[in-house]
Amino acid sequence: MSDVAGAAHGLYRAVFGGEPEWGYRAPGRVNLIGDHTDYNGGACLPIAIDRVCVAVSGPGEVSGSRQGMQGAAIERGRACVIDPACDELVQASSSAGTPAPGWARYVREVARGLMNTARERGTAMRRVSLAFAGDVPIGAGLSSSAALEISVCGALEQAWGIELTKRDRVLLCWKAEHRAGVPCGQMDQTASVYGEAGRAVLIGAAGEPALIPMPRRDQASILVANTKVRHELGDGAYRHLVEGCRGAAVKLGVESLCLADPSAVEDGACGLTDRERRLSRHAVREHRRALRAAELMVEMALVNRTGSRSAASGTERVGDTAWRTALGLLGGLMLESHRSLRDDYRVSCEELDMLVEVAMNSEGAYGARMTGAGFGGCIVALVQPGAVRTVEERLIDGFRRRHGRECDVMVVTASGGAGPVGMT
Ligand code: GLA
């Protein structure tokens, strides 16, 4: 059992005094490129990472005083009881006057969504005890909330004997996040559900998400540096962006802002405000950058395949040049993306800009950009494997010197998506 699963298991035992029967893990994500495109009908290219949330569940017997709290989910740390017999599923606080923890609204809305599905299917539901643990940094733009939603969804599905398709699990959790107050796109939930080891998930190009091979591990490493400037998506800034984009799309006469005609964005005929023009310019270009990035990665994968064949005949160097060029281009797109998020979309901040600059000035970095919604959180950098240590040190030193505190740096790998975990 992984550390995180062990922690969830231990919490369950401590709170409920028994063993959980089911467990479900869901990863966070890092977006390589394509931010603020998903709710604009455009493409993004995240990877599921090796940081996860695990939710464990078991039949929800409540004992003693808690029994009296009829029906509601009773919260205790990161644990609660969910009772389908009660419509007002999670009560606002575990004891009068204590505010509900931040996670409660996500759990509540996921459970609500799944209860509706169960009712539609005529599935009987039992009371469920639930506990969770995770190592996705919270508020860092790495999708801790989607990891929580998907893991809770999976653990409740198991307890209620329901099996959603991947697509339905994404939709249920995405709608739950909306009801919890964040009008997000589907990138985070999709990456967590569809992620695969060694693959990025291309979302929003057409139809189902497509799995795109990552560069080989000896070709590029993915570094993530966390400014620890906490972003709060529920605070209105994200909603304001979504609404701004909607307004721009109406003026441009398109349903998806990312698909607007680039010249219509610039020519002034549609009466876009300056802000709407900047938002639209980012959306239109970022969508294309994400698609181009995916194309480059596919080209690299082809080179890698033919490269290893030609290695036998002594011509590997041709392939080497090709993948290095592809990584250089990919890095260039990442930097363009950062500038666009900084100057046009205006969701970066000084700490993020500084880390991107330090990464880009380090030998061995192909590209770097802020990742996720912005307003703080993390940058992602694509780095030569041999240069990881140096880039890491430069980021940490530079950040300490400029901001007088530490940033967290980690190497992440494209990892498997959500799924059940054994409880033994
Ligand atoms: C948050 C949202 C996503 C996406 C990103 C920005 O992570 O949850 O849907 O919009 O911001 O790309």
Image: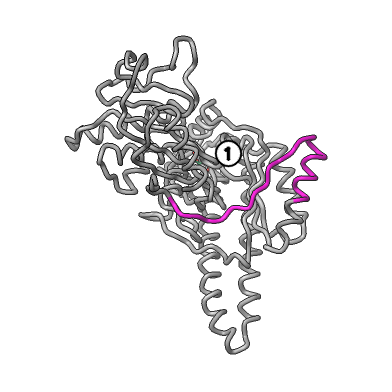
Q: Which element carries disc 1, helix, strand or loop?
A: loop
Looking at this view, is 262 or 221 the one in front? 221
Measuring 50% from the left and 44% from the top, which residue is drawn there? 52
**Label 1 belongs to which residue?**
137
Looking at this view, is 164 or 265 the one in front? 164
In magenta segment, residue 402: yes
Res 156 seen here = yes
Q: Residue lying furthest top in this view? A: 97
Measuring 57% from the left and 87% from the top, which residue is drawn there? 312
Taking the image as shown, residue 358 lies to the left or right of residue 280, namely right
Range of residues picked out in magenta: 393-417
Q: Position of residue 3 (x, y in %)?
A: 52, 44
- In the rendered view, would you say 355 is above or below 375? below
Q: Quadrant of residue 275?
A: top right
Q: Residue lying furthest right in this view? A: 401
Type of residue at label 1? Answer: Pro
Q: Position of residue 213 (x, y in %)?
A: 50, 64
Q: Quadrant of residue 16?
A: top left
